[in-house]
Amino acid sequence: MEIIVDQNKCNGCGKCVKLCPFNQIKIVDRLAIIDVGCTMCGVCQELCPTEAILIKRERLNAEDTSNYQGVWVFIEQYQGRIKPVSLELLGKAKDLAYKLNQELVAILVGDKVSHLIKDLTPYEIHKIYFVENEVFKRYTTDAYTQILVSLISQYKPNILLIGATNTGRDLAPRVAARLRVGLTADCTDLDITEEEYLLQTRPAFGGNIMAQILCKYTRPQMATVRPNVFKKFQFSSNSSSPEVIEVEAKLNPLSIRTKILKMIKEVSEVANLEEANIIVSAGRGLGSPDNLYLVKDLAKILGGAVGGSRAIIDAGWLPHHQQVGQSGKTVAPELYIACGISGAIQHLVGMQTSKRIIAINKDPEAPIFKVVTLGIIGDLFKVIPLLIEDLKKIKNN
Amino acid sequence: MKIVACIKQVPEISEVMIDSKTHTLIREGVPSIVNPFDENAIEEGLRIKEKFSGELIVITMGPPQAEEALRKCLAMGADEAILISDKTFAGSDTLATAYTLSLVIKQLKPDLIICGKQAIDGDTAQVGPELAEQLGIPQITYVKKVEIPEDKKNIILHRETDDGYEIIQCQLPVLITVLKILNEPRYPSIRGILTAKKKEIRIVKANDLKANSAMLGADGSPTQVINIFTPQPHQKGKLVKLEPKDASQEIVNFLRQEKIL
């Protein structure tokens, strides 16, 4: 890695001096000079008005890659709570770290989040890089990219895993592009090959095929994983406390180019799909949005959340955040009831890891029946009202 | 206002079948479409253009036949279309694709770049952010509403988060990736289709770009697909055809047995 200032392009404007989070740039004779403490975080390259700064990030050979050590997990937090997907990733990352005989490292970034260190203790983490600053109170692409790129450039991890939430899917590609490294989205499996590469498996073409991907020449090897793909692991109660390394971040507010005016928490009438134990989902078989009450009532009596297939979400029957499937959410509840859903592959990949699956559909050939625990061939307009009645009776007794 | 929309021609996923003997995708006869999320990108571009005047340029990188997808966008009302197509670009992953797109878009100097949230064949959602980074401009992903004040000094966007949404203000230029709920894409008019037929589509080859050749195509792609396979079929569960009353009882019994009730 090397940082170069193009003398023909640099006009000595000094913008980079103000923006450098690490105070490593000065202007001498109207030319930017980079000091030795540069972490290659890339803020100056990104924001230089004359594109005079270039960080050369080249392909690595085997010797270089061995300098990159450790399996990192980006801990996503929202309003002082760790997202479950980050904990699921720690379990998988622990496996990978064990196979490589490398450290398991958590990256915790936020504002007033020190209480979360305690929550991470049971996960047998070796190290936590902990960054606390007001600028990280709310997620912004610019602030989080800068801090992650600078941590990576300084401490050189071998692998970095990020949850494929809306936040993670915004952040990961931005970081990967700044570092010029490979990134694999929405992995459903991760393993280590004999040559010690990260083997990344992901669905493509709506889940019709699976692809296995390696990043041989760039580090870190980056992957995102959707919530509910890996199970949270059972940790031992006597795990030792991780070493906490506090890293200072001095981001210049000018380098954050977006401003959040307002955050609106949308408490839908149903529980968050990804965290629900029971999900009742509706498909085109319901015929019309007027019949959605069947699914909603069934969900209500079971204490579950309501989901929907792509067809009905596209038709506007339910909001997008209730969509289950490849282009919606991946869910793995204790019980999934599919009502009038034929089961296109793109839907199946979003729910097939559910513990128990019941489907009600009048078409015996519907592909959904290939993944069910219990399949009912029948008219949902007759079965569901009776089922609701039966469940009510049981509840009342 | 100069707007660029990035689109991709994709196979109609619901029509993709697997050859049961070879376990490979049967691509012959599968229709190609404009990636559905990209139609929302075009639609939003058209609406902004109609409101503020300006131009909408649509860009794709792909094989020569991707021209068909560009014609559809022209028919919807886009002013210009650019097809980035060259054997050198073959095997590009998201990073190399974003790099190549960035070289062409930099020359256009747009105020706003709109992409669909992801393509339905790869589903990575990576090209948008990777393109924004290589253009050196901010990004807002998962946009469900766009507001532009009269002075066009900045833009206000509603971005879907995992817990609701946020309202973000940002200066131009910016790259946004958009959701389906943003708008309802229009159908091309007959007149639009006729005009689109006559329009010239600019073809960009590798030689037309001042590119670092090590960053193009398979050479410039850090990710490498080493294996493709079809997912394991599932174990068959219990499938029953019963009268509604018995069906309901069957479900109740199952829920009891599994200790859900």
Image (spheres, coloured by chain):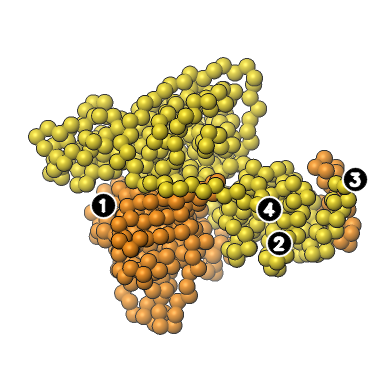
Chain colours: A yellow, B orange
In space, the residues marked 2 and 4 are separated at their CA atoms by: 10 Å
In space, the residues marked 1 and 2 are separated at their CA atoms by: 54 Å
* Amino acid type, label 2: Leu
- Whole-percent x, y for residue A296 in the image: 72, 56
Residue at image x 32%, y 38%? Answer: A253
Q: Residues within 10 Å of mark 3 (few under 14, many from 20)?
A: few
On whether disc 3 and disc 4 are found on a single subunit, the reply is: yes
Q: Dots 2 and 4: beta carbons under 8 Å?
A: yes
Q: Nearer the viewer, residue B76 or A2?
A: B76
Whether residue A213 is visible to the viewer of this picture, yes or no, is no
Q: Chain of mark 3?
A: A
Residue occupied by mark 2: A292
Whether residue B184 is visible to the viewer of this picture, yes or no, is yes
Q: Residues within 10 Å of mark 2 (few under 14, many from 20)?
A: some
Badge nearest the viewer, 2 or 3: 3
In space, the residues marked 3 and 4 are separated at their CA atoms by: 26 Å
Residue occupied by mark 1: B211
Disc 4, SS: strand
Q: Residues within 10 Å of mark 4 (few under 14, many from 20)?
A: many
- Whole-percent x, y for residue B102 in the image: 31, 54
Residue at image x 49%, y 65%? Answer: B183
- Whole-percent x, y for residue B5 in the image: 38, 62
User: Is residue A18 toward the left or the right of residue A73 in the image?
Assistant: left
Q: Dots 3 and 1: beta carbons under 8 Å?
A: no
Q: Quadrant of the C terminus of chain A?
A: top right
Residue occupied by mark 3: A397
Disc 3, SS: loop
Badge nearest the viewer, 1 or 4: 4
Circle nearer the N terminus (2, 3): 2
